Each structure stands twice: as structure tokens, then as C-alpha cells.
Image (spheres, grey):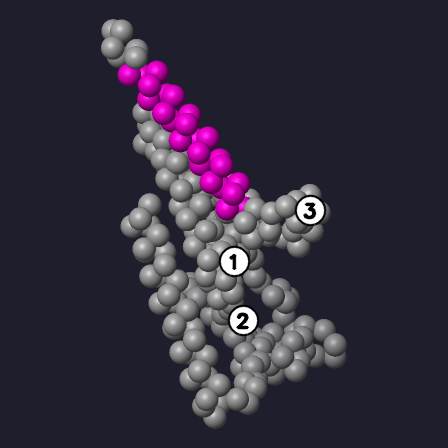
Amino acid sequence: MALSMVFTFGISLVLNQANTASGNIQTSGTQNAAVQLGEKGLILTNSLNRNVTAVVILDGTSNLSGPRVIASPGQPLAYQGMSIGRAVTELPSLPFGDDTPWFLKSLSIDIRMNADIMRQMYAENFFSYLVYTGSLIFLLCALGFAIKFSVWPLANLFFVTLVFRGILAFVAFFYSPGIQEITASFLNNRLSIAMALPVLFFSFGLLVHFYSLLVFAAKRKRNDDD
């Protein structure tokens, strides 16, 4: 837990200083004019991989339905122009498709939301940041028994991933505006919202630690009886 706290604090400090330095460089320079995007020859694709379909909009964002060049892997370049209000060739308008698995996409969204929450805590109130990260690390350490949930390592890895995914989703759910209003009305100024989730994490971590101690004592007694 101590090493995790030091590592988390160090990473947050480095990222915060890097963001501050980049912000100072950007605001102090002369590059304050808005960057014009979407000029002629705009390339649209849903991946940085070159082996996917890409569309080149020749007129840019000023005429998205205008002439375009479609580049498909393993096929020659296809030109799609406009003639008397209809397409010259029967090609799809935007041949894109997001084939990212739903689990990975939702996991990426939750990780970004949790990162934003931690960055905001670090910038606004350092004490709240320490309490939140400490309670979260305490909970994750308490869930260490999940690594030995079964005798199959792959099943343990799958179970740990689900537990981690559930914690991320719960944090994102808790800090949503609607849940924040409900929590504030339920607490009725008895406890601040910033401390509600750390208290919940710490309490659940204590319960899990107590359960682990009971399981360890039961196994120890059974081994002594045998």
C-alpha cells in the first residue's frame, strides 16, 4: 500500500507539472490563433492503421457530400464525384464501422473518467486526493484474495478483471450529476460528498479483510485438525 501510494502520488505530480508546463508554453507563445481544420483533402478514417478504409474529402468540411476518393486495402483508389445531383459510382458515403468490442470501449471510457476525477481532486484539494487514493488502494489490496479465487490462473485473471472493471464503473456512476444530488440529499450535511466514497471504500475494505482473516483461521484450524 505504501509503495502504491508513493507511485500514484509521483505519477500525479509529474503529470500535473507536465500539463502546467505545456499550458504555460501554449499561452505564452504567439500561437493563440484558432487552427483551421478540415481544409481540402481532409482524410477520414476510424483507425491509425493503414490497412483500413479511408476517405479523402476533396473539398473539405465545406462540402462533405462532394467529390471524394476512397482508399480500400488491396483495391485501387476509387473516385466518387457528383453529377446532376447523384453519385457517379455506387460507393458507400462513409464506409466506416467501429468494430471495437463493447467491453474494451466501455473500459476505456471508465478509465478516462476516473483519471479525470483524480486529476480534478489533485488540482482542487490535495487532502481529498490523498484520502480517495488511499481508500481505493486499501480496497484493492483487500481484494487480493481474488488472485487465489480458484486453482485456474486464467479464471483468476478473468475474475480480477471483472472486479477492477466493476470498481471503475461504480466510481463513474457515483460521480455522475444525478447520483451526486441524491447522495447529497441522503447525507443531509452529515458527511461531505468528497468523503462519502472514500468512507465506503474503506468500510468495504475492512469487511473484506475481516472475511479473509476468518477464511484463513478456518483453513488453519482445519489443517491442525487433520
Q: Circle 1 sits on which residue? A: 117
Expressed as whole percent of the image width and height from the top left, the position of residue 166 reads: 51, 41
Q: Secondary structure at mark 1?
A: helix
Which residue is nearer to you in this view: 140 or 165? Answer: 140
Mark 2 vs 1, N-terminal side? 2
At x 39%, y 36%, the residue is: 142
Q: Secondary structure at mark 2?
A: strand
Name above or below for residue 222 compared with residue 6.
above
Q: Quadrant of the N terminus?
A: top left
Q: Which residues are magenta?
A: 197-220
The amino acid type, in three-letter code, at marker 3 is Asn
Q: Circle 3 sits on which residue? A: 188
Q: Are marks 1 and 3 in contact (CB under 8 Å)?
A: no
Q: Circle 2 sits on which residue? A: 44
Q: Secondary structure at mark 3?
A: loop
Name above or below for residue 224 compared with residue 47.
above
The amino acid type, in three-letter code, at marker 1 is Ile
Task: Check residue 207 for magenta coloring.
Answer: yes
Task: Check residue 166 for magenta coloring.
Answer: no
